[in-house]
Amino acid sequence: MSFDNLCKLLSEKHPVNFASWVLGTAQTSVKVLKTELSIEPIRADYVTFLQLKGRILHLEFQTKLESTPPLPLRMLDYWVRLYRLYRLPITQVVVLLLPPAPETIIETAFSVETTRHEYRVICMWEENPELFLNDPALLPLAPLTATTQPQTLLQQVVERVNQLQPEQQPEISAYTQILAGLKYKKDLIRQLFREGMMRESVIYQEILEEGEQRGEQRGEQRERSLILRQLTRRVGELPQQLLERIETLSLEQLENLGEALLDFQAQADLEAWFSALH
């Protein structure tokens, strides 16, 4: 999935949140328009059309300004088509995910002789991160917002992801990591999200609490039980042979397994982990 298409998906899953953000006012009635425009699109755009109260909102996400035909002409073209179809006022907003090369002029209008058409451009690298950090629907865009300390911002994003409800967390975490890849190195993203998952996970918290309250022996027993439960949830019921091998692990090996299982998808991953011990 491309970055632009992921943003389109998010805006159509959470139209109220996105419309409220780009318009700067709370919206309560927003409907995603699935209607195709009456003639062929001039390119395969990742655009979102939302119907508000008495208005159409056209959202377009871009990782770069360069395109064929040029962005200003595309915006005029879409305005004409939308107005012809709906006969409503139209607000057009282009969201630039990444800054262009230095000295690049970011155009906000199409102008040829007596024809002039204007649209808005939102530059993600100039947006205040607070709004995005505090709204789960917008959180995947937070890594791209304004900051003088990028790694600190990414750590804040990870913390927010880990505070989400369990049913929200996997999907939003995946979207956030994908969009963070536009700005941050893959290894850093992987490291921070993994560390964050360990800090916030039930396994980690319960291991710490048990170790402090009942001592090392009971803590180890509790840790082994929790890891077995987590393994079962991730890869299914374990055969007796694997259960017996887990019983022989030391405390340090159990802690290593507790971290490694976050990446497991099948029993083969657990078997490969055991093979790597020798």
Image (cartoon, rainbow, N blue to C red):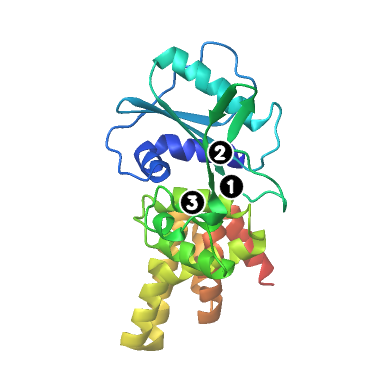
Residue beneath disc 2: 61
Q: Residues within 10 Å of mark 2 (few under 14, many from 20)?
A: many
Residue type at the position of mark 3: Pro
Residue 88 versus residue 48: which sits nearer the camera? 88
Classify mark 3: residues with Cα within 10 Å, few (<14), some (14-19) or many (20+): many
Q: Classify 10 as above or below 91.
A: below
Q: Identify which amino acid the numbered label 2 is placed on.
A: Phe
Query: Mark on residue 140?
Result: 3
Q: How many marks?
A: 3
Query: What residue appears at the point 33 percent right and 32 percent down from the top-left corner?
Result: 30
Q: Secondary structure at mark 3?
A: helix
User: Label 1 vs label 2: CA separation?
Assistant: 7 Å
User: Does dot 1 land on a helix, a strand or a loop?
Assistant: loop
Q: Of callouts 3 and 1, which one flags the residue occurring earlier in the amino acid sequence?
A: 1
Q: Amino acid at mark 1?
A: Leu
Residue at numbered disc 1: 97
On the image, the x and y values in percent for residue 139 come to 44, 53
Foreground: 270 or 39? 39
Q: Residue 184: in sight, yes or no? A: yes
The residue sitting at 45% across, 50% down in the picture is: 172
Query: Alpha-carbon neighbours of circle 1 within 10 Å: few (<14), some, or many (≥20)?
Result: many
Q: CA distance from mark 2 to mark 3?
A: 14 Å
Q: Quadrant of the N terminus?
A: top right
Q: Quadrant of residue 85?
A: top left
Q: Is label 3 or label 1 in front?
A: 1
Q: Which numbered marker is on residue 148? A: none
Q: Position of residue 108 (x, y in %)?
A: 58, 37
Q: Are marks 1 and 2 in contact (CB under 8 Å)?
A: yes
Q: Position of residue 181 (x, y in %)?
A: 62, 54
**Mark closest to the chain's N terminus, 1 or 2:** 2
